[in-house]
Amino acid sequence: MLIETQALTKQYRHQRGWLSRAEAVTAVDRVSLQLEQGMTLGLVGESGSGKSTLSRLLLGLEPATSGRILYRGEDITGWSFRRMQPLRAKMQLVFQNSFASFDPLFTVEQIVAEPLLNGPKLSAQERRNKVLELLSLVELDQRYLKRYPHELSGGQQQRVGIARALAPGPELLVCDEPFSSLDFPLRKTMLGLLLRLKRQLGLTVLFITHDLSLVSELCDRVAVMYRGQVVETLPGGQIAGTCTHPYTRQLWQAVPVQAPRYRKPRDLQMKET
Ligand SMILES: Nc1ncnc2c1ncn2[C@@H]1O[C@H](COP(=O)(O)OP(=O)(O)O)[C@@H](O)[C@H]1O
Ligand SMILES: [Mg+2]
């Protein structure tokens, strides 16, 4: 088992007004998940269901209120920032909006090279070669090396975000709605890229999305999150046939019909009459 959570819980205190008592909001509620090495786990749920909070807990970016996180069987719950440092290279995050996480004054080369500065010492040439290798992994032409983030398209920015996440040589890639801001054909292309990277590099992936249609292709298993809790876990390819929770059915029915050949029979009948 690469990473596992046991009854992981995160509460935030919300102060509504000056005089009112702070209320506790349970963003993540007793979540127990298991990610085996090499597996792709989808985490789906509507906005506000606690997906991003769970990913921050997993990566040790925020402390949990209760519960445990095990990495390769070792309890890493509550580890200090410094103690987490070597592990951090092993667990990397790809954001929905990579652009917002880039330093606008850095070129693509500097952005992708930055995580390499924390690793083993490399000469300038070695570092450049490593960046080129990473860009070729994410299928971004080397002529973008000296470009700035604002000169890139949304898809290219996400490619740079993935290249930067791959730079420290992670085992686990947590992708938090990485393609949500891209249009549908591009989303498909990027999904294909992620699938290839996963196979080629033997990555374990946690793929977070609110779109069930994306996870069914990519993921071995899918965990459905609702109001901070994982309400069910399903086999990736068979969501429609196996889901039992009403919320999952609702999510599945909300999957937009993207192309005529995916149309549900009912839609076709309606067109004929
Ligand atoms: N830093 C924070 N402080 C207070 N409340 C937060 C914080 N982060 C998230 N929340 C609350 O936790 C809940 C889950 O949020 P989030 O994890 O961002 O959901 P998702 O990623 O599924 O949209 C929401 O109700 C949100 O308001
Ligand atoms: Mg989120």
Image (tube, rainbow, N blue to C red):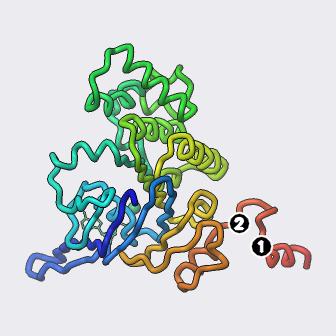
Q: Residues within 10 Å of mark 1 (few under 14, many from 20)?
A: few
Residues at discs 2 and 1 in contact (Cβ within 8 Å): yes
| SS at badge 2 | loop
- Residue type, numbered disc 2: Val
The relative height of residue 83 versus residue 241 in the rendered view (above or below) is above
Name the residue rendered at 49%, 68% in the picture.
Answer: 44
Identify the amino acid type marked 1: Lys
Q: What secondary structure is found at the residue carrying circle 1?
A: loop
Label 2 beta carbon less than 8 Å to ligand 1:
no
Disc assigned to residue 144: none
Q: Position of residue 114 (x, y in %)?
A: 32, 30
Ligand 2 found in image quarter: bottom left
Residue 240, compared with residue 152, is above or below; it is below
The residue shown at (27%, 22%) is: 121
The quadrant in which the C terminus is found is: bottom right
Q: Quadrant of residue 248?
A: bottom right
Question: Which badge, 2 or 1, is on the more N-terminal residue?
Answer: 2
Q: Write the residue at 24% across / 43% down.
A: 86
Q: Is residue 54 left or right of residue 10?
A: right
Side of 229 relative to 40 (left or right): left
Residue 65: x, y in percent?
Answer: 20, 71
* Quadrant assignment for the N terminus: bottom left
Check disc 2 and report the residue beneath it. 257
Residue that badge 1 annotates: 264
